[in-house]
């Protein structure tokens, strides 16, 4: 099954977060068709979480859904920013959604 375009997915996820009362913004626009999507969750206490595309080896079936895994959890905000800069150097077409939520809510389907 084909995967939903990145620009449509980001737009829909931002709307979903807004409906749930979770403040979020699109911080970086990547490739509309297939850019990787990363989410930073600022815990508003100096720490943050970073989520990115789940490794393909962890995904059981390719049903076209985007799945995510934690890259950093409860990390210092500066460390998260350093990792984001590293990811951008690796892939300039990536998207970044930034969420401000003390409870760490993100609305993602995670793969552990």
Image (cartoon, helix red, strand yellow):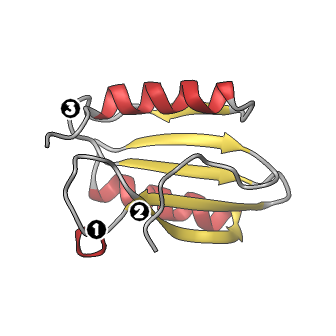
Q: Residue at x 68, y 71 (%)?
A: 75
| Residues at marks 3 and 2, CA–CA distance in whole angstroms | 22 Å
Secondary structure of the residue carrying tag 3 is loop
Image quadrant holding the N terminus, namely: top left
Q: Which of marks 3 and 1 precedes in the sequence?
A: 3
Query: Residue 60: percent from the left, percent from the top?
Result: 25, 69
Q: Residue furthest left?
A: 1
Q: Residue 80, image x and y in percent? A: 59, 62
Badge number at residue 59: 1
Would residue 99 appear left or right of 88 to someone viewing this image?
Answer: right
Q: Nearer the viewer, residue 50 or 60?
A: 60
For the point 69% across and 60% down, the residue is 48
Please report whichever mark, 2 or 1, sits nearer to the chain's N-terminal start.
Answer: 1
Secondary structure of the residue carrying numbered label 1: loop
Q: Which residue is mark 2?
A: 86
Neighbor class of circle 1 (other Cα within 10 Å; few <14, some 14-19, many 20+) is some
Give the residue pinned by disc 3.
33
How many C-alpha atoms fall within 10 Å of the one at disc 3: few (<14), some, or many (≥20)?
A: few
14 with respect to 89 (left or right): right
Residue 85 in the image: state x and y as whole percent. 46, 56
Query: Mark 1 against mark 3, which lies toward the viewer?
Result: 1
* C-alpha span from label 2 to label 1: 24 Å
Task: Please tell me which residue is depicted at 85% across the width and 58% down the height of the picture.
Answer: 45
Location of residue 38 with respect to 73 vertically, above or below: above
């Amino acid at each position: 099954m084909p995967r939903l375009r990145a620009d449509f997915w980001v737009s829909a996820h931002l709307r979903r977060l807004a409906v749930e009362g979770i403040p979020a913004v699109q911080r970086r626009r990547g490739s509309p068709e297939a850019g990787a999507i990363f989410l930073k969750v600022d815990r508003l206490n100096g720490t943050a979480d970073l989520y990115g595309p789940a490794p393909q080896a962890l995904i059981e079936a390719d049903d076209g859904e985007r799945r995510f895994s934690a890259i950093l959890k409860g990390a210092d905000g500066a460390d998260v920013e350093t990792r984001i800069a590293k990811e951008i150097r690796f892939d300039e077409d990536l998207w970044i959604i930034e969420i401000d939520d003390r409870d760490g809510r993100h609305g993602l389907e995670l793969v552990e």
